[in-house]
Image: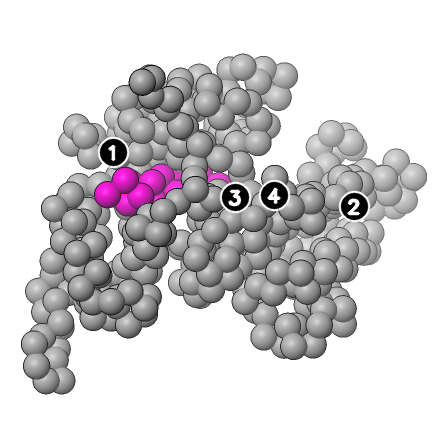
Amino acid sequence: MKVVENYQFDFFQNLSEKCVKNIKLLELISKKGIISRTEISKTTGINIVSVSNYINKYIENKLVLEKGFDTSTGGRKPELVELNKNDNFVIGVDIRKDSIRVVLSDIGMNIIGKAHELRPEDKPKEAVGMACGLIDEVIKKAALPPGSIKAVGVGTNSGDYAAIGKEVKNRFGIDTFVGDEPSCAAFGERSMNKKISSESMLYMYSDVGCGVFIDENGGRVSDGESRYLSAWNDMLGVVNLAKYDVARGVGTNIVEIAKGKMENITEETVIEATENKDEVALSIMRSVGMSLGLRIAYLINLFNPKTVIIGGGIEKSGDLVLEPIKKTVKRLSLKDRSGSVVIMPGLLGEESVSLGAASLAAREIFIKV
């Protein structure tokens, strides 16, 4: 029988109960740092015998280390464990239309090395080759022992997943998995942001309303599964709103910052103009905040998440966008939901996709145990 290699991240649609438990344990151990088997059992609801069986398997595969005993209030002292960060590393890659980012981290998501390069938008076929060059660069600089890099994760919204995964794996001989940018960023926030519990989460990627919903078990719903999470018209985004105002001849500091060139207008350009108290830029950010708030209120009513994360770059505008989002959500979402949901900016910044891809690569290691 011919074996077909799968280069796509499995976002829980096809995972067994065993795999789901593996990932729950990984998330908990990663966020806690050092934790006892007893606490793992109490937190996850998985019985202590099953937890011990999973942990013993991790130890056997050198994914987890024993760290002695915790203090006891009576009876047997709880055994402590932590991730084996010295022998297990992953690589995360973010292939965007204008740039490529690569991070190398241990399975605890501590960055060991990273690289970044701009790429010409008119040469899409060269993107994977450029990514491989950056991967090679961070591997050589880190000088890690052979075999210690266990997996590569790639986040991209362009190209064929299987072709990208195959090319990277053939180049480096490391298991490679590929997924879309918003999902990678969403899972990165879920796994690395300690302010986020393991309950349901809605991640909004960028200013055009592209959403990813992750349930309490870590299963994903994205625009591929639900049209309600699809991005809306780009004309509602920061850049196109700014270009529209500039084209109309509205007086704004955005023109000066962009050096008079329409193609230089970016999200960062508009945010910089708001720092100069430019009224046009301020109005654009408030408008985008209200639009996002409208979209988020609807999604809260539909999915009932416990946390909403604003990411993809728009979070850099801070309260200019967050405040109108929160006010709109409070006004338009169901009262029993708006009062309990927490809305916060993403913490991973420009590395959100690459770190998210790396965290998903670590997850794939545990899925196979």
Q: Indicate yes or no whether the magenta region holds residue 354.
A: yes
Q: Which residue is mark 4?
A: 225
Discs 3, 2 touching: Cβ within 8 Å: no
Q: CA distance from mark 1 to mark 4?
A: 32 Å
Residue flagged by tag 2: what amino acid is it?
Leu
Task: Name the element at disc 4.
Answer: loop
Q: Which residue is mark 2?
A: 236
Say which label, 1 or 4, has the lower sequence index. 1
Say which label, 3 or 4, has the lower sequence index. 3
Which quadrant is home to the N terminus?
Answer: top left
* Segment colored magenta: 350-369
Report the side of 212 relative to 94 (left or right): right
- Give the image location of residue 65, x and y in percent: 14, 53
- Give the image location of residue 149, x and y in percent: 25, 33
Is 120 rendered above or below residue 299?
above
Q: Nearer the viewer, residue 59 or 264?
A: 59
Q: For the point 57% across and 57% down, which residue is it?
A: 202
Task: Name the element at disc 2.
Answer: helix
Q: Please identify the quarter of the rendering in which residue 152 is found.
A: top left
Task: Name the element at disc 1.
Answer: strand
